[in-house]
Image (cartoon, rainbow, N blue to C red):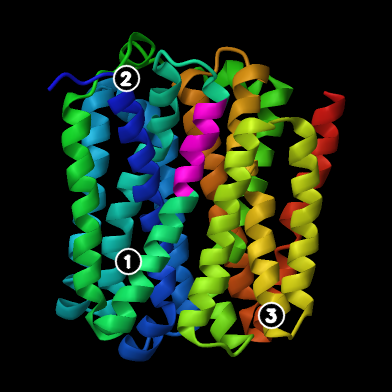
Amino acid sequence: MKYTYKHTIAACFISYVIHAVIVSFAPLLFLTFHEIYGISMHQITYLIVANFGVQLLTDLLASHYTLYLGYRKSLVLGQVLCAMGFFLMAILPEVMPPLTGLLISISLYAMGGGLLEALINAVAQGCPTKNKEKIMSLMHSCYSWGVMLTVLVSTAFFFFVGIGHWRFLAFLFGLLPLGNMFLFLHVPLYPVVETGADVPNYKELFCQKNFILMLLMMLCAGASEQAVAQWASAYAEMRLNVSKTMGDLWGVCGFSALMGVARILYSKWSGQRILKISAILCVVSYLLIGLTENPLWGLVGCALCGLSVGAFWPGTFSMATIRVRNGGTTMFALLAFAGDMGSVLGPMLVGLGIHNGMNRGVLGAIVFPMLMTICMEKNKKA
């Protein structure tokens, strides 16, 4: 079989689906971990911090990995680490202290996910395709569909098989990166990528005001998205008192579905104005989630948040490729680092305020979409 750039793009798209599973599977089980292992809700926050914390450290070092290993070996390594994390997630909590076992397995697949996230954007940019901004937006939409896939498959599995057998589902999810690994062993990586083991140009990047602004926007994008995404399932059960199935389908799945729709729409009507409207809409969704006690409006707020944050990541990445000079692999890695830093800070802020009520935790994180709105104003004047 002859592999072409279309197969390369497909492998990149699948990598974003895998990244979605990495980010969204464990949160569906937070209350289960609390009940069967006795892990407190405060300790649950450690799992979120481990996931995104390891990812952001990997993002920071990704350009150095690539410099020594090359792109193909780095991409294959990322897939292997993701698979190992899921496989061990099904085993380690049973043979050692549960929290420790979960932290180890989550850290492993987070390392793989961080490596993929930092490299995949450069791989896709290197392919000889027209309208790269559209490809980037569609690729990022695969993350949203990946979250939906995770929620729908998990909900069906928990309903028909039972949530007590979640370990088997973790093992099945581990097969996905193994399959994608074989694609990356064979697909072509184009010259801009193969010669892209570039020496990190940190000084040149940080001397550009536009790059600093893009980093801040990525931080706000990650925080605004994950503060709701990571806690949506628990929020629906604890704050809105709806069933797990209802909360996951209408809260988490609604969030992801509209986020995916937003990214597809952004691929057709991209622009700074869309990002600014999205930032304002995100503030409104946070107010709705934080202030309402009505289950319907709370779930609407979660879904509306997904619609509002959808354009943040692909929009900032695309804007950076235009406004930042000589970015290369290092720029993509640092932007991913900033996004994952926000993905730690947002959920962590919610977790810290959760003892005062889930709604107050979410309202505390509203600072990030508000800051995103300010960044868009600054970007307009830049």
Q: Can residue 53 be seen in this view?
A: no
Q: Is residue 214 toward the left or the right of residue 317 in the image?
A: right
Look at label 2 and name its amino acid: Tyr
Q: Quadrant of residue 235?
A: bottom right
Q: Nearer the viewer, residue 149 or 174?
A: 149
Confirm or deny contact between disc 3 and disc 2 (CB under 8 A): no
Please state the extent of the stretch shown in magenta in the rendering: 134-143
Look at the numbered disc 3 and give the secondary structure of its residue: helix
Which circle, 1 or 3, is nearer the viewer?
3
Q: Quadrant of residue 161?
A: bottom left
Mark 2–mark 1 Cα distance, whole angstroms, equals 37 Å
- Residue pointed to by mark 1: 103
Check disc 1: other Cα within 10 Å, few if <14, some if 14-19, many if 20+. Answer: many
Q: Main secondary structure of the magenta part?
A: helix
- Residue pointed to by mark 3: 296
Q: Nearer the viewer, residue 5 or 201?
A: 5
Image position of 182 with respect to 303: above or below: above
Confirm or deny contact between disc 1 and disc 3 (CB under 8 A): no
Q: Which of 328 and 182 is in front in this view?
A: 182
Which circle, 2 or 1, is nearer the viewer?
2
